[in-house]
Image: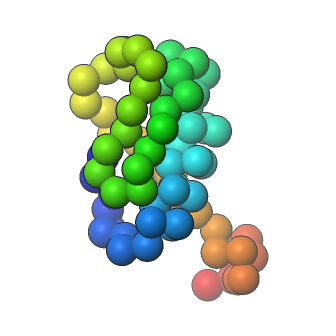
Amino acid sequence: VTITPEVVSRSVNRAIMADLVKLYRESDLGMRLPAYDGRKSLYTAGVLPFTSKEFIVKLVDEEDGVHGP
């Protein structure tokens, strides 16, 4: 897993992956529920339907809200 721009916080990385799973589990992840270590490794109980794929996930800072900076 590569997250860009690079994030140093494991909790932010996990939030990104949680949103990715919420958005793409049914469509692109083949209904797999991955386990993520917070850094570079993502594990599933079976093969994903791709070898490499780019996803776009946008996070909203909860302190700023949807319309904040």
- For the residue pair 61 and 32, the one nearer the viewer reads as 32
Residue 24, quarter of picture = top right
In the image, residue 67 above or below residue 36: below
The quadrant in which residue 69 appears is: bottom right
- The residue that appears at 64% across and 75% down in the rendered structure is 61
Residue 22 drawn above or below residue 69: above
Residue 28 visible to the viewer: no
Percent across and percent down for residue 42 are 37, 39
Total numbered labels placed on residues in the image? 0
Which of the pair 57/39 is nearer the observer? 39
Look at 52% across and 66% down and name the residue there: 11
Q: Position of residue 33 (x, y in %)?
A: 55, 28
Q: Is residue 30 in view? A: yes
- Residue visible at 56% across and 38% down? 21
**Residue 55 place in picture, x, y as percent:** 41, 42
> What x and y, as percent, mark residue 53?
31, 33
Q: Is residue 52 left or right of residue 63?
A: left
